[in-house]
Image (spheres, rainbow, N blue to C red):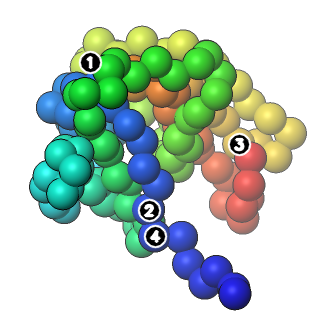
Amino acid sequence: MRVIKLLHTRMRVSDMDQTINFYTNVLGLEVLERKVSPRGSHLAFLKVPNSEELIELCSFPPSGLVTVQEDLVHLAFQVENLDDTIEQLGTKQIRITDGPTTISSGSRFIFIDAPDGYEVELIERPPGVKIV
């Protein structure tokens, strides 16, 4: 066997509408599909600009609220201009929880909190830099 492509990553969430609102209105992701699985899970598939991989949100109320341990899981998204991003987050009253930080490659990043304790890292990379 050889894996040939990452298709999606699933994240369980407590409140589907709140989480979709965050990812669409704060980060600009797009909902491609919402459905209910045969076992009753509420699912939403989010498209990230310039990526083929999707984020699958899953809400299964019978399993209770989601509690993500601190510093366990985060999603990282590249942004074009971190200063503009910080300004836009401020107008949406989204608090920066860490940063801005600049590392030796010249990349700069911040962290914000998403619903359920998930963290989101927003990274500005200088031309030619591939990883943080």
Residue 125 image offset from top left, x and y in percent? 64, 49
Relative height, residue 128 to residue 63 (above, below): below
At 56% from the left and 35% from the top, the residue drawn is 74
**Tag 2: amino acid:** His
3 or 2: tag closer to the N-terminus: 2
Q: Which residue is mark 1?
A: 91
Pointer 2 local density, CA inside 10 Å: few below 14, some 14–19, many at least 20:
some
Quarter of image, res 100: top right
Q: Pointer 4: residues within 10 angstroms few (<14), some, or many (20+)?
A: few
Which residue carries the number 3 mark? 107
Callout 2 touching callout 4 (CB < 8 Å): yes
Mark 2 secondary-structure assignment: strand
List the residue tagged with mark 4. 7
Secondary element at tag 3? loop
Q: Is residue 100 visible?
A: no
From the viewer's perspective, is 129 left or right of 34?
Answer: right
The total of numbered circles placed on residues is: 4
Q: What residue do we see at 51% from left, 27% from top?
A: 119
In the image: residue 116, left or right of residue 35: right
> Measured along the vertical axis of the image, is residue 28 above or below residue 102?
below
Where does residue 106 sit, x and y in percent of width and height?
76, 43
Residue beneath disc 2: 8
Mark 3, other Cα within 10 Å: few <14 / some 14–19 / many ≥20:
some
Amino acid carrying label 1: it is Thr
Measured in 3D between alpha carbons, the distance from the residue under mark 3 to the one under mark 4, in whole angstroms, is 27 Å
- Residue 109: give x, y in percent of width and height: 62, 33
Instruction: Look at label 4 and name its amino acid.
Output: Leu
Instruction: Using the image as rendered, state which of residue 70 and residue 104 is in the foreground.
Output: 70
User: Where 81 falls versus 89 (above or below)?
Assistant: below
Tell which circle, 1 or 3, labels the residue nearer the N-terminal end: 1
Q: Of tags 3 and 4, which is closer to the observer?
A: 4
